[in-house]
Image: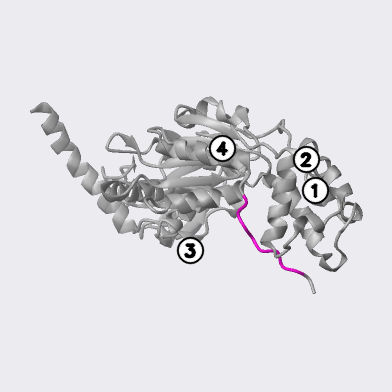
């Protein structure tokens, strides 16, 4: 019968130092630190402990950032903060997090984000992380952040686009392996936690002598050894064959598996890409060119529209362009004469490079940057628009903004 290993948090010196480091980071006014080391260094157990302690006085979200898209990243945060929203707009999600942080500031400490596998994040998610790092409440940073990775990745941290992170970084801590004596103590503690009353009698001396060399002193490797020993409970004491029976890929090698990647994408390479361009023509002549930088852009003949086209065949708010994670989406706003893409009438449509939108007797050529053309085939789906701000909400927001401007201008004049 196979023995099930009981999980137990067994601290070792480097973990204790790391715990103190993280407590200092979270108490600092900048509140941002980096913890790094191989996956077998016990970082997950350490994060679990610090998160458990912090939850006594603050909201905590522990998110694995590996290849998460921006909206999935922010939704994961909000879910752990107690919100099941599934919003599809980065701006709406950031606003919701800011609202939450304001609420927390009134009664509790600033929320904490623990972001695991930070160095495996998508560049677009890194951009969102920088926006999170800039949120403030009452002149203090709204979110305290712990970045966790298997390497420091200085090229990412020192990227100019990562300035919101680097200016808040209070320090970095690198997990260290155990010494030979610490490794033996750790292994004995692991075996004892799993019911082995006399751990020193469970393994022969030849194992204790080669233990540190075989494991490198990493607790994850020592856990593998403990598992192998526990499987042979009826054969104590076990000898060196325990090592030989372990598959070579079960034990982590610092030199083989932790290395600086030469082609890690950094934020500079991707952040703030060129926005989509619209070339608007009438009777074969270009009359206007516009960039689509906002998440939502309304086209119509009304002054409340973002792109105004004065023409009797175009409705006041005729159509809306929506950007989401590398895709551009056209939504007809129940216009009188309809919206067409490449001569086909549509209610909603994912746009591709060089598509021609027809509104009334105007033609709009869509020019997408490379970052959009790579993802437009599998970007936003029609059903996703139902999660976004409704058309009426968008119109109301434009109207409110239009009415607010004169009042603000009058306030400044007075």
Mark toward the start of the polypeptide (4 vs 1): 4
In magenta stretch: residue 9: yes
> What residue does disc 4 label?
17
**Whole-percent x and y of residue 316?**
29, 50
Report the residue at 30% width, 49% height from top. 312
Q: Do tag 1 and tag 3 residues touch (Cβ < 8 Å)? A: no
Report the residue at 60% width, 50% height from top. 44
Residue 131 seen by the camera: no
**Whole-percent x and y of residue 57?**
37, 51
Tell me, for residue 251, which label it has, or none.
1
Camera-nearest label, 2 or 3: 2
Q: Do tag 1 and tag 2 residues touch (Cβ < 8 Å)? A: yes
Quadrant (top left/top right/bottom left/bottom right) for the N terminus? bottom right
> What residue does disc 3 label?
383
Cα distance between the residues tagged 4 and 2: 19 Å
User: Left of 153 or right of it: where is 389?
Assistant: left
Cα distance between the residues tagged 1 and 2: 9 Å
Report the residue at 61% width, 44% height from top. 117
Q: Secondary structure at mark 2?
A: loop
User: Left of 42 or right of it: where is 279?
Assistant: left
The segment highlighted magenta reads 3-10
Tell me, for residue 399, which label it has, or none.
none
In magenta stretch: residue 12: no
């Amino acid at each position: 019968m196979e023995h099930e290993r009981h999980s137990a948090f067994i601290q070792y010196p480097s973990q204790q130092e790391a715990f103190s480091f993280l407590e200092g980071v979270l108490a600092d006014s900048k509140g941002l630190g980096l913890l790094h080391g191989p996956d077998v260094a016990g970082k997950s157990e350490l994060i679990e402990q610090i998160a458990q302690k912090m939850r006594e006085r603050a909201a905590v979200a522990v998110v694995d950032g590996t290849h998460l898209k921006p909206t999935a990243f922010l939704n994961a945060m909000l879910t752990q903060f107690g919100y099941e929203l599934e919003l599809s707009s980065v701006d709406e999600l950031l606003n919701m997090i800011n609202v939450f942080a304001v609420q927390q500031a009134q009664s509790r400490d600033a929320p904490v984000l623990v972001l695991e596998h930070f160095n495996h994040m998508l560049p677009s998610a890194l951009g969102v992380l920088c926006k999170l790092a800039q949120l403030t409440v009452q002149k203090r940073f709204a979110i305290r952040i712990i970045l966790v990775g298997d390497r420091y990745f200085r090229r990412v941290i020192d990227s100019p686009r990562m300035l919101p992170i680097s200016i808040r970084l209070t320090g970095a801590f690198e997990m260290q392996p155990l010494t030979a004596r610490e490794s033996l103590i750790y292994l004995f503690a692991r075996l004892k936690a799993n019911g082995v009353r006399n751990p020193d009698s469970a393994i022969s001396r030849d194992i204790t002598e080669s233990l540190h060399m075989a494991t490198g002193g990493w607790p994850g490797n020592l856990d593998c050894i403990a598992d192998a020993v526990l499987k042979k409970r009826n054969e104590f004491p076990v000898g060196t064959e325990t090592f030989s029976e372990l598959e070579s890929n079960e034990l982590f090698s610092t030199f083989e598996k932790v290395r600086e990647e030469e082609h890690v994408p950094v934020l500079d390479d991707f952040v703030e890409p060129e926005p989509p361009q619209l070339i608007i023509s009438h009777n074969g002549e270009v009359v206007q060119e516009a960039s689509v930088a906002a998440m939502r852009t309304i086209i119509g003949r009304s002054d409340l529209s973002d792109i105004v086209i004065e023409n009797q065949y175009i409705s006041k708010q005729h159509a809306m362009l929506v950007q989401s994670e590398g895709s551009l989406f056209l939504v007809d706003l129940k216009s009188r004469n309809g919206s067409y893409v490449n001569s086909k009438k549509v209610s909603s449509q994912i746009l591709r490079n060089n598509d021609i939108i027809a509104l009334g007797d105007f033609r709009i050529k869509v020019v997408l940057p490379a970052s959009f053309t790579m993802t437009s085939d599998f970007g936003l789906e029609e059903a996703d628009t139902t999660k976004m701000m409704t058309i009426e909400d968008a119109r109301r927001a434009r109207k409110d903004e239009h009415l607010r401007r004169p009042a603000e201008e009058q306030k400044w004049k007075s």
